[in-house]
Amino acid sequence: MNKLRTLVVVHTSLVPPDRLEGYSEKEIDEWRTEYDVISALRIAGHEVQTLGVLDSLTELRVALLEWKPEVVFNLLEEFNGIVTYDQHVVAFLELMRCPYTGCNPRGLLLSRDKVLCKQLLAFHRIPTPRFAVFRRGQRFTVPRRLRPPLFVKSATEDASLGIAQASVVEDMPRLRERVQFMHEQIGSDALVEEYIQGRELYVGVLGNERLTRLPIWEMRFGTLPQSLPAIATRKVKWDRTYQRRYDITTSAATDLAPAMQQRLDGLSRRIYRALHLSGYARIDFRVTPDGQVYLLEANANPNLTREEDFAESARAAGLGYQELLERIMQLGCKYRAAWRDFNA
């Protein structure tokens, strides 16, 4: 593709250095995604500037007006500490009539709000675990339709924040305790789902109107003790020492029957369109031993670290890391935002 003037927008605390030398593995992991993306874009010949955003859009507006980027590579996952506010930053980019990578504001709104997402997908007859919402400040009442074991997570936070082995509960006292933890320690409403045992599969999707499904990826829980629920806790996802101890990996899913691959492909496309996603996303499923498929989450703008599952899945499809980033940039430049219909 043509070399583009590219503004990479990141959280203020995640602006990476130019080199890795002198930093520990733990320090690098904090801004690994940002470093990988920025360095790959520069190697590919794009003119890159990086902008850190915390709680103000003033600097972003100045950069758009003065530097006039041809595309904004959006790596921002929150605004002023609030995950669900990232949609407003993207909406601002649309108001400024600037192309950007990743998902549009509507798709971010629908996918980030896990409760609204599940309600919408239920309307579209997408199979998801039965659930209930326990809101802060309201009386603790368990719907009769829910049967343990139950999985307690935040209704809004992502990156497995607040998810630990204690998130899977077997009885009402532990459910009450975990819901209280979510309210008081995480500061969010609690989303409680029936826990689904089975394989955890990730389906990467690229596209706006026309969609490309990447090879199906699987979270393998290795030697995690059978007494512990096989869930993607924060340790499982991000703690390298924990991953090495229990041989926890992600890799291409094997032994999937063609019919199951077709089902996952069809469901992923339906979910992507139902939630009005664009750019790229990862759809997370659980498949039970008897072949039942349940949607866990739809993740707009998933992690783009070079060695994480989305990029590795793309690589398995013959799309190298630089090619993946440029494909995402092309999709951003081609996304038909409303302003294009009125652009003189």
Image (cartoon, rainbow, N blue to C red):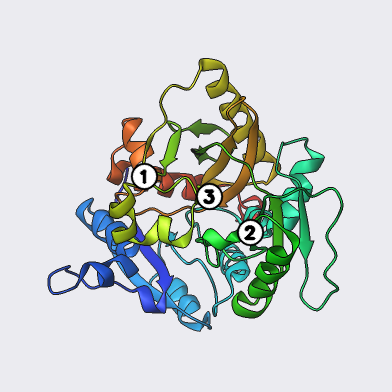
Q: Residue 323: name its quadrant.
A: top left
Instruction: Tell me what residue is drawn at x 29 percent, y 44 percent.
Output: 321
For badge 3, the amino acid type reads Pro
Residue 118 appears at what percent x and percent y?
73, 49
Residue topped by disc 1: 223
Q: Earlier in the sequence, mark 1 or mark 2?
A: 2
Can you tell which mark lies on residue 229?
A: 3
Q: Earlier in the sequence, mark 3 or mark 1?
A: 1
Instruction: Tell me what residue is drawn at x 28 percent, y 53 percent.
Output: 244
Instruction: Tell me what residue is drawn at x 55 percent, y 51 percent.
Output: 299
Tell me if residue 212 comes above or below residue 277 in the rendering: above
Q: Secondary structure at mark 1?
A: loop
Tell me if residue 221 comes above or below residue 190 in the rendering: above
Residue 46 visible in the current orientation: no
Tell me if residue 159 comes above or below residue 121 in the rendering: below
Can you tell which mark lies on residue 112?
A: 2
Horizontal side, residue 54 vs residue 243: left or right = right
Q: Secondary structure at mark 3?
A: loop
CA gap, disc 3 and disc 1: 12 Å
Horizontal side, residue 22 vs residue 26: left or right = left
CA gap, disc 3 and disc 2: 25 Å
CA gap, disc 1 and disc 2: 32 Å
Given residues 207 and 339, the one toward you in this image is: 207
Give the number of marks. 3
Q: Residue 266: name its quadrant.
A: top right
Mark 2 crowdedness (10 Å alpha carbons): few <14, some 14-19, many ≥20: many
Do the residues under discs 1 and 2 have CB atoms within 8 angstroms? no
Mark 3 crowdedness (10 Å alpha carbons): few <14, some 14-19, many ≥20: many
For badge 2, the amino acid type reads Arg
Mark 1 crowdedness (10 Å alpha carbons): few <14, some 14-19, many ≥20: few
